[in-house]
Amino acid sequence: MTENESVLVCMRVDGFCVVYPGSVKDRCNVCHAEVWVAPSGQAGIATGQVTKTMCIPCVVIRVREDPPQSVGLLPKTAQEVRQWLGRN
């Protein structure tokens, strides 16, 4: 993975039955499968923190071929924190 590449790892839509509230469908930039993007991922895309969305199978292949220099987490949105705390 390149130094300036920021990949959002997403669950595929097919076969996944639990969806985080506020998630939207997008496409994996590699295989083009539909994926779920949670609100924090949507915010990362909007601000340019995320340069690619990839499904988990594609990330696994990519990491094996070219391990990342670093791994980070996007900050959660206020909506996600309220949901976790049970305060919708």
Image: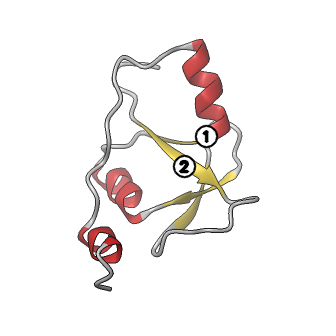
Position of residue 65 measured from the top left corner of the image (x, y, whole percent)? 60, 13
Secondary structure beneath label 1:
helix
Position of residue 10 measured from the top left corner of the image (x, y, whole percent)? 54, 49
- The answer to which quarter of the image holds residue 83 is bottom left
Q: Tell me the quarter of the image containing the C terminus.
A: bottom left
Q: How is the image coloured?
A: secondary structure
Position of residue 46 measured from the top left corner of the image (x, y, whole percent)? 34, 56
The amino acid type of the residue labelled 2 equals Cys
Q: Residue at the bottom extreme?
A: 88
Marks 2 and 1, the one that precedes in the sequence: 2
CB under 8 Å between discs 2 and 1: yes
Please, is residue 32 above or below residue 85 in the view?
above
Please, is residue 4 above or below residue 27 in the view?
above
Q: Is residue 78 left or right of residue 54?
A: left
Position of residue 50 measured from the top left corner of the image (x, y, whole percent)? 38, 43
Residue shown at 65% from the left, 33% from the top: 58
Q: Nearer the viewer, residue 86 or 71?
A: 86
The circle drawn on residue 56 is 1
Residue behind mark 2: 10
